[in-house]
Image (cartoon, rainbow, N blue to C red):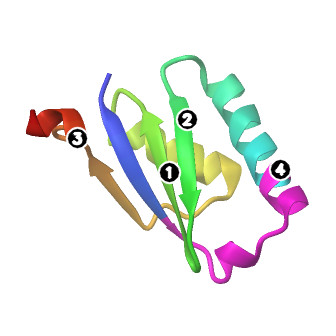
Amino acid sequence: MPKYVIEREIPEAGKLTAEQLKTISQTSCGVIREMGPEIQWVNSYVTTDKIYCIYNAPNEEMILEHAKQGGFPANSISKVSVIIDPVTAE
């Protein structure tokens, strides 16, 4: 299944409390349960003003629908072409 990186612009995302992050996560998981197993949230990285999310989904449209239903921004969606890591250097 294709993997996507979603950039969500959220001012002061890095200042969100643990409780706020829990609520956002619960909302995301609830939408995913409703949408079905074709979309999977892998993980997210919270920075100062953005959250970068990694999702598996059959297409970009499903990512956009998840964002719409969850009330999340999806400012940029990029399909991952290749994954590299330190093992790639061997």
> In what quadrant of the picture does the N terminus appear?
top left
Q: Give the distance between the C-alpha atoms of the residues marked 3 and 4, in whole angstroms.
A: 32 Å
Q: Give the distance between the C-alpha atoms of the residues marked 4 and 1, in whole angstroms.
A: 15 Å
Mark sitting earlier along the chain (2/1) = 2
Residue contact at pointers 2 and 1, CB within 8 angstroms: yes
| Residue where numbered disc 2 is placed | 41
Question: Where residue 12 sits in the image (x, y, percent)?
Answer: 67, 82
| Residue where numbered disc 4 is placed | 22
Disc 1 marks which amino acid? Cys
Disc 2 marks which amino acid? Trp
| Residue where numbered disc 3 is placed | 86
Disc 4 marks which amino acid? Lys
Mark sitting earlier along the chain (3/4) = 4
Q: Give the farthest residue toward the front.
A: 90
Q: Is residue 46 placed above or below 90 in the rendered structure?
A: below
Disc 3 marks which amino acid? Pro
Seen in the image, is 65 located left or right of residue 33?
left
Q: Give the distance between the C-alpha atoms of the residues marked 2 and 4, in whole angstroms.
A: 14 Å
Q: Give the distance between the C-alpha atoms of the residues marked 2 and 1, in whole angstroms.
A: 8 Å
Identify the secondary structure beneath mark 4. helix
Q: Which residues are magenta?
A: 8-22
Which corner quadrant of the image does residue 62 belong to? top left
Q: Is residue 31 placed above or below 24 in the rendered structure?
A: above
Mark sitting earlier along the chain (3/1) = 1
